[in-house]
Image (cartoon, rainbow, N blue to C red):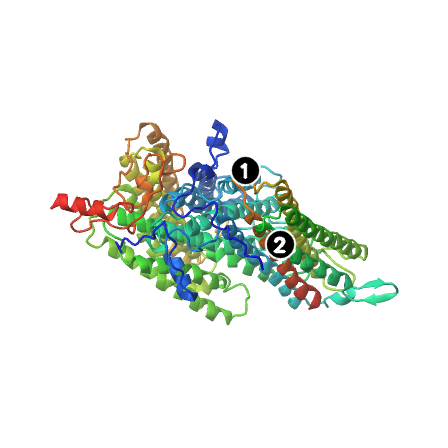
Amino acid sequence: MAETLLTDPGQSPARLEGWRGIAADWASDQRAFKNVSWGKAMMWIFLLSDTFIFSCFLLSYMTARMSTTVPWPNPSEVFALNIAGKHIPLILIAIMTFILISSSGTMAMAVNFGYRRDRVRTAILMLVTAAFGATFVGMQAFEWTKLIMEGVRPWGNPWGAPQFGASFFMITGFHGTHVTIGVIFLIAIARKVFRGDFDVERRGFFTSRKGYYEIVEITGLYWHFVDLVWVFIFAFFYLW
Amino acid sequence: MVDIPYEGIRGIPPAEVPDVELYHPRSWWTRYVFSQDAKVIAVQYSLTATAIGLVALVLSWLMRLQLGFPGTFSFIDANQYLQFITMHGMIMVIYLLTALFLGGFGNYLIPLMVGARDMVFPYVNMLSYWVYLLAVLVLASTFFVPGGPTGAGWTLYPPQAILSGTPGQDWGIILMMSSLILFIIGFTMGGLNYVVTVLQARTRGMTLMRLPLTVWGIFTATVMALLAFPALFVASVMLLLDRLLGTSFFMPSLVEMGTLSKYGGGSPLLFQHLFWFFGHPEVYIVALPAFGIVSDLISTHARKNIFGYRMMVWAIVAIGALSFIVWAHHMYVSGMFPQFGYFFATTTLIIAIPTAIKVYNWVLTLWRGDIHLTVPMLFALGFIITFVNGGLTGLFLGNVVVDVPLSDTMFVVAHFHMVMGVAPIMVVLGAIYHWYPKVTGRMLNETLGKFHFWVTFLGAYLIFFPMHYLGLLGVPRRYFELGDATFIPSSAHSLNAFISVVALTVGFSQMVFLFNLAWSLFKGEPSGGNPWRATTLEWQTPETPPGHGNWGKELPVVYRWAYDYSVPGAAEDFIPQNQPPRATQLAQGAAS
């Protein structure tokens, strides 16, 4: 146990491949995830914790749906819209999903341009992502308004199990809050990118730490996560 | 594809964290109040947790007064008794033990023990404390709102938690849920810091398998907390919605005060599953840091390397993993599908294996060690003895057939107080005696410490050991008074009175401890940098108490594990982790 193994700070050791590489990294000093900065590691671990929150919400909703003794409202009917005289089930949700998935695309492009240090394009793509996100939240507000006008409440609705409204408002509300926070962060980071904070290594207002373009990628991680969660909500709440 | 130069390493050079990345306080306020230094945050966490813990201690005295001398104290009524029980349990488990072990010891010890200058994100770490303080204030405010705090029991089971008839139905339950949500948000901010600091900010030479077991315990507990608190978060949000908006997540249709309530179709069992998916890991969130710290106390004060270090690490990890699949052993009598009991009883009993490994290793570390009966060592020994007791009764309660008759009796109260009340508190106290010199630069008074230990240890045993017999007699828990039930002999009432007297005595001895903390701060013997002659990095800091940035100009470099005590041939009976091999050889040469 008293061995004196020490990685030489001057040179980076040869990387092993595959599982041996993982074992070597975890057995080494200083960092378990080589090349992963503190901020990125922290975001990944936060997302893991957040996954458990959304999983608990979804499992609770599924428990309620499976154990209720009154019929569950049919989502494709509830979330149908009459557009140009046609009755189209789930159309609004389909558009919302499309918008959110598209925003993941623009986010990925923003990350790419960020690492190329293309300030203007990065900022624009982040703002486009934020706009998609804001549109999504806006459509969610429209959907909430429509359902509330039709008489859906957290404690009941005209079509069946009261847990329908309760789960709907709670889960989409919690997800919508995540999207809103994401939009705010995207706008804040886009402003920093556009101003060139990361080129001149300007210090953060609160943390007094230097910023790097990596923050674009970290914001992206959060944004992709919020999208991925939506895919599960879409599948389990609307398509079931 | 354009080849994009990867910059992930920027900001964290391999061998040294640049000093400029540290936040430097500019005024008294940012140094001592809104401090981003993990050591100050640790002290803030500890003081807040101790303050709210004292409230819970006083509540326990009031409960014991009522139980020991029913009818004597007119200022305690049945509703208040339920409120005392609820707040005592909630404060002790979450706001005291969790916050003290992770926020207090975690913040102080992790950066020092892994050789970092601070937590990775000091600003977030500071926010963690302030949100925790807000959670504590919201919790404390329930004592002053109309109706008082909730009396639903610390498990807060619906439906009764939010029905009229339960004390604190107006405000207490709402504020309790809000406080829990705040606590979880605050903890998450701190917890992310602890995990990333251990994984990504260790110093040169500090491999995971050279970490002191204290860090392993706190680290594993933090990972568990990050995965278990989400369930409590979700349960709190849903219960809050049930109470505030009238949703029916947990509320079946039922008759409340003679009228059909507005609720219907919800599942009370769902709450129990969510609660215990948090609640059982929570037991180990409290226990694992205690396991880790006590390993270091025993090794240091027995001047002997810890026995089976690798097994100790794997046992911590195994306990952490297993604790996520045992939660329903709290629900054997709840109306869950009975055959689930087999699965959960099996997994529960399997946890006894890694736990027993740890106990054997502690004892084998003591075996033929050079045991110094210092105050930290006394508390460590006290921990082993109470923990073994509580662990053995855990085997009783883990079995379905034995648990069913013992459920909701004083036996359960005795069990969990032994295993996750007294045992971790023993470690907390021992750890305070151990690290107080590092935090303040002065030793705690040893005479007062020994008095404190013997009264606390013997007293705790006298309180909780007889409670097992009360439980076997069938004395129920959470009852305001026992009345004239024929199955309870009069000796049980005398025993209750005896327990209450001892409880008040033990409570008094804690005041001696608080006096010692305050007195030694000014009058204690100066300790020097390494009074226990310990190997771990926090004792090797250039200044005591450690200054801002912990390490002066250069970070320490680690050459060995944390347990080089009494190495044959070495000049001293301990070799610090950062002592280079060459220096050791020279010392050996000088000795021979």
Instruction: Say which element carries label 2.
Output: helix
Query: Which quarter of the figure has residue A98?
Result: bottom right
Q: Residues within 10 Å of mark 2 (few under 14, many from 20)?
A: many
**A5 or B459, nearer to the observer:** A5
Chain of the residue where label 1 is placed in the rendered structure: A
Task: State if disc 2 and disc 1 touch (CB < 8 Å).
Answer: no
Instruction: Say which element carries label 1.
Output: loop
Q: Which residue is mark 2?
A: A223
Q: Residues within 10 Å of mark 1 (few under 14, many from 20)?
A: some
Q: Is residue B28 above or below residue B216?
A: above
Is label 1 or label 2 in front? 1
Residue A164: percent from the left, percent from the top? 71, 61
**A101 or B237, nearer to the observer:** A101
Q: Which residue is mark 1?
A: A203
Same chain shared by disc 1 and disc 2: yes
Residue B544: percent from the left, percent from the top? 33, 34
Q: Amino acid at mark 1?
A: Arg
Residue B146: percent from the left, percent from the top? 62, 39
